[in-house]
Amino acid sequence: MLLSVDNLDIHYGHAQVLHQASMSLTEGELVCVVGRNGAGKTTLLRAIGGFMKPSAGDIVFKGEPMSGLSLEQVAQKGIKYVYQDKRVFGDLTVRENLELAAYPTGESMDSAIEKLVAIHPKMKKLLDAKAKGLSGGERQILLIGRALVGDPQLLLIDEPTEGLAAIIIGEIVDILLKMKSKITMVVVEQNLATVARLADRIYVMKEGVMAREITQREIIENPSNYEEEL
């Protein structure tokens, strides 16, 4: 078991937003977490990534407890988080964005660039472009490439296709499929067609509760059964 989340409770002030949420992940899996806005999906990812401290429950990664570790310590253990809002350093070039990710890991710039270009060769022509001039899809690709620096073992990716055109969504999905054999991923996603292409397993969240687990085949064969849940 690479990751185990057991009976996780999370509070924002007095409001409880996760209620005994549990999930597991084995090495090499791509697991999707689906549910309506406000269901607790992003909160779950942020807790695993070290951005939030649970009020109860356990997060265990590679047999080690993660609860209580700082954000930096969680990243050093091999967990990287890809933000939903496509947050890049706009006044820096693509190359400089990669450099910021590479410096604390000790990875060479050649290696960091190679990883970005490997997932999307067209990014090679954009290395010296300012990140603020990138399209939404290009920003998402940069964020994924940046997260690969340092060779993490687990990527947490929040809504990678949100706000993107259909043709760009296809490119992002192709990138994630290409990465599947090399890295384990938890992907929060609301697009059922995307989930059906990507996921080995799917967790459905409702109002902060991990309601059930479903399979890729169930979504492909009966998509209408799940449309109301998203």
Image: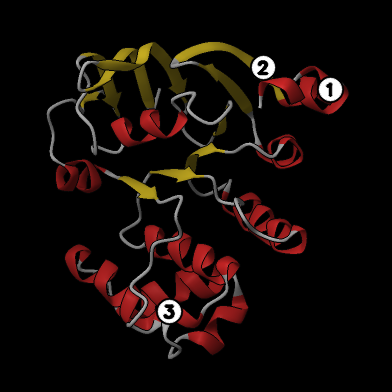
Nearer the camera: disc 3 or disc 2: 3
What residue is shown at x 62% (from left), y 55% (from top)?
A: 163
Q: CA distance from mark 1 to mark 3?
A: 39 Å
Q: Nearer the viewer, residue 55 or 202?
A: 55
Camera-side residue: 200 or 168? 168
Q: CA distance from mark 1 to mark 2?
A: 14 Å
Q: Which residue is mark 1?
A: 224
Label whose residue precedes the other's in the sequence (3 or 2)? 3
Residue drawn at point x = 58 percent, y = 25 percent: 35
Q: Closer to us: mark 1 or mark 2?
A: 1
Query: Quick one: SS at disc 3?
Result: helix
Q: Amino acid at mark 3?
A: Ala
Instruction: Residue type at mark 1: give it.
Output: Ser
**Colour style of the rendered protein structure:** secondary structure
Dot 2 falls on a residue whose secondary structure is: strand
The disc placed on residue 214 is: 2
Residue at label 3?
A: 131
